[in-house]
Image: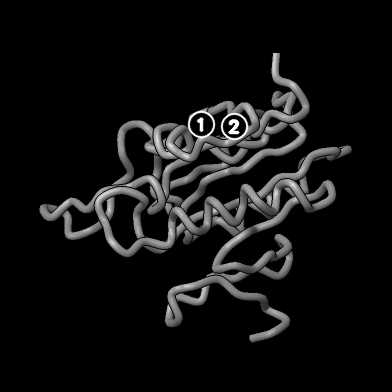
Amino acid sequence: MAKTDTLHFIMTGGTIDSYYDGSKDTAVPHAHSAIPKFINTLKLYETCEFTEVCMKDSRNLTESDRKSILNAVIASKSKRIIITHGTYTLPDTARYLKANLKNNDKVIIFVCSMIPLEGFIPTDAGFNIGYAIAQSQELSKGIYVCMNGRIFTPEEVVKILSEGRFGSIYTR
């Protein structure tokens, strides 16, 4: 059973957990997440738990996948959850959780990257994950997106493809 100081990672695929497939000329999610291996190299003080919900490009996530993410959050005993996700539909999934999660008493942070965690230098993945971990210790209960050194709410977050980062609809 997870303790309250457990940090629970829920992985769903996306660029952060992908590799470049030259035959498809695109990033493709790994069969299994690289996040646990990466997190274990960080020597964190808290216990970490990992749940792989799916490994998909976020453009291929279905209503059923979003419900599985919601169910993983509900089932988690942890008060701190980080959900790794693809960039394209992360705002949609964050809003889905906000609309469907009743009585939330957890800090839930979505995080992604524009460049995969493995096989690319430089990559924003490690920084974004580290930032999400740090913010999970400070934020009050709620749902957030931590990207590019900023914290966003599900209602405001937007992917700015031309800038290769996330931003707020209020400050664009």
Residue at 30%, 48% (x, y): give it: 118
**Quarter containing the C terminus:** bottom right
Q: Quadrant of residue 30?
A: top left
Task: Residue 11: give x, y in percent of width and height.
Answer: 50, 38
Q: Is residue 16 left or right of residue 172?
A: left
Task: Residue 63: give x, y in percent of width and height.
Answer: 57, 41
Q: Quadrant of residue 36?
A: top left
| Extreme residue in the bottom direction | 172
Residue at 48%, 45% (x, y): give it: 61
Label count reads 2
Residue at 11%, 53% (x, y): give it: 23
Mark 2, residue position:
68
Q: Amino acid at mark 1?
A: Val
SS state under label 1: strand
Q: Do callouts 2 and 1 mark residues in contact (Cβ within 8 Å)? A: yes
> Could you say which is closer to the camera, residue 55 or residue 7?
7
Above-or-below relation of 86 to 108: below
**Quarter containing the N terminus:** top right
